Amino acid sequence: MPFSLPALARHLANYVIPENSKGFTFDPRQGSHRSFSPDEFVVAIKGYERGFLRLPNATEVLSWLEWTAPILSLPGNHIGAWQNGLFYLDVSVVVKGLAKAVQVAYQNGQMGIYDAATNQTLLLPRREAA
């Protein structure tokens, strides 16, 4: 990662989050927002989400980064953020193809995926228990 965790936390809390409070996908290895091709979708990885009542400060972001660092450091994993009543940070992956993205979302217990091409969240039909 181009930043230490404390520097990354400060960068996210002071610049990235306030300027993109509706949501973003950030590549911690590049230190920048992720650009997308039209057939790419973003899916959160189960177990790495944290919700905040307000936009988190650098200390709160650092706490989340320290908790998620082992998985966030893996190639292909990104910092995701979105709002749905609360402000959420998550570890997410970028998946090529809608069918594959839906499969990864169901495997991770997600209710939706982010379609970067349309800037919309696609809600998934609930699957019935077998």
Image (tube, grey):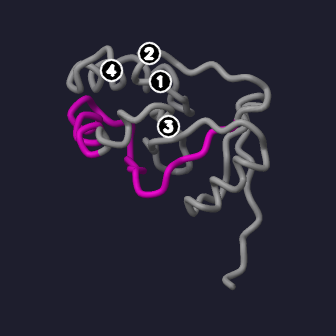
Front disc: 3 or 2: 2
Q: Which residue is mark 1?
A: 27
Please give left or right for residue 2 compared with residue 99 in the image.
left
Q: Which residue position holds label 4? A: 1
Kindly identify which residue carries mark 2.
Answer: 30
Q: Considering the numbered disc 1 on the image, is that residue within a helix, a strand or a loop? A: strand
Mark toward the start of the polypeptide (3 vs 2): 2
Q: Position of residue 109 (x, y in %)?
A: 57, 63
Instruction: Report the Cα–Cα distance between label 2 and label 1.
Output: 5 Å
Q: In what element is the residue under mark 4? A: loop
Residue neighbourhood size for the residue with mark 3, other residues' Cα within 10 Å, grouped as few (<14), some (14–19), many (≥20): many
Under circle 2, the secondary element is: loop
Q: Quadrant of the N terminus?
A: top left
Q: Residues within 10 Å of mark 4 (few under 14, many from 20)?
A: few
- Whole-Å distance between the Cαs marked 4 and 1? 9 Å
Circle 1 packing at 10 Å, graded few (<14), some (14-19), many (20+), is many
Quarter-of-image position of residue 42: top right
Q: Nearer the viewer, residue 62 or 18?
A: 62
Q: Write down the residue under mark 3.
A: 81
Q: Which residues are magenta?
A: 41-67
**Amino acid residing under circle 3:** Ala
Amino acid at dot 4: Met
Which amino acid type is shown beneath numbered disc 1? Asp
Q: Are marks 2 and 1 in contact (CB under 8 Å)?
A: yes
